Amino acid sequence: MGDATRILDIDEAGDRAASARDAILDLQSRVNQAIIGQARVVERLVIALLANGNVLIEGLPGLAKTRAIKSLARNLEADFSRIQFTPDLLPSDVTGGEIYRSDGQGNGTFEFRQGPVFGNLVLADEINRAPAKVQSALLEAMEERQVTVAGKRYRLPDLFMVLATENPIEQEGTYPLPEAQMDRFLMHVRIDYPSDADEVKVLRLVREESAEPASPATSPKIPQQAIFDARREIDRITSAAAIETYMVGLIAATRRPAEYGDNLKQWIAIGASPRGSLALDRASRAYAWLQGRDYVVPEDVQAVAHDCLRHRVSLSYEATADGVKPDDVIDEIVRQVAVAA
């Protein structure tokens, strides 16, 4: 009887895993239909969601950064909130604050009113258009999934993810993000121009959307439980000791660049923190799960390395002056660091 029960439990767990994967792949497919030519960006958003991390998307205006995030939220059973970052924004505009409520008889109490950060998917739009003081209001929320106001702590929802967009720093009216905040993003994703063929499809898609009146979505939204089930499956993804050593080796190369040649020694000023290793581990396991595997291979780590590390490696002045980009540095590290036999 016990063996039969165990077999049923295993079968039921397998069915839930398959159902969760089907739901996530369906979510990814829906967003791809709304964001043409940016399949890689969409995949990174899904990976960050599965890995329970925050994501920063960087790109020039008009490249569908906000559209991608809103499309993800529209197809997911989740509360969506948006914070439009501007130079005059206050920290309380993000976290919320206490307001005084009077009973009309001279008595009253302070009551906490939640800010937009208390959503499931929080769009921090053009995050680098607000000063560091406002950007730092997100630090506690992103790392500890709580906010502290007037000495009291308020927990954020179990499903919580900050999806921030930024325009390139060299544009007028923007502020560099604090390094402490950058490190709290699981991934830093860059979005580029679509191909000519894809841009023709974008024209047709937008034209169709303008011609047809908005109608309620016919497909049911993906439930939050599918995300939680998928995360449990990803927690069971195995990484061999050699893979773990490989991930740590990639991070170590950013801290001891002199061991890997004069180029890296000249390029890197500050290496990645241990959060870089954790990000590689979480993102590579989520990527392996999306590929239908229950174990991580070196290609999984390499597939997410640039997105997990490009915001964690600080370049030297010489590298910046020579036009070296963070991706160039990561390319060199991936080329040089080998997987242990």
Image: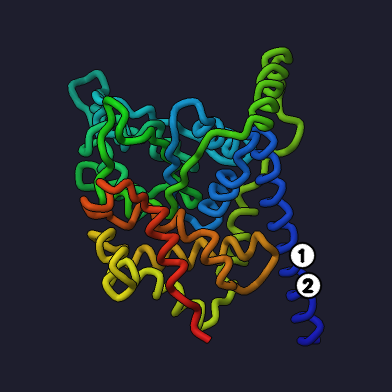
Q: Secondary structure at mark 1?
A: helix
Q: Position of residue 62 (x, y in %)?
A: 50, 26
x, y percent for residue 335: 46, 68
Residue displayed at 41% across by 60% down: 330
- Say few, some or many: other residues with alpha carbon within 10 Å of mark 1 (under 14 / 14 to 19 / 20 or more): few
Question: Distance of mark 2 from mark 1, alpha carbons?
Answer: 6 Å
Task: Check disc 1 and give the amino acid type.
Answer: Asp
CB atoms at circles 2 and 1 under 8 Å apart? yes
> Is residue 115 in view from this perspective?
no
Relative vertical location of residue 125 with respect to residue 325 in this rendering, above or below: above
Q: Residue at x 51, y 52 (%)?
A: 48
Residue 15 badge? 1
How many residues crowd mark 2 within 10 Å: few (<14), some (14–19), many (20+)? few
Task: From this view, report whether residue 187 is shown above or below residue 276.
Answer: above
3 and 215: which one is in front? 215
Label 2 element class: helix
Q: Nearer the viewer, residue 267 or 275?
A: 267
Front residue (pair 317, 52) = 317
On residue 5, the disc is: none
Q: Label 2 amino acid? A: Asp
Q: Identify the image quadrant of the N terminus.
A: bottom right
- For residue 8, side relative to residue 129 (left or right): right
Q: Is residue 42 above or below residue 252?
A: above
Coloring scheme used:
rainbow
The x and y percentages for residue 44 are 54, 50
Name the disc covering residue 11, or none.
2
- Viewer can see residue 260: yes
- In which image quadrant can residue 218 be found? top right
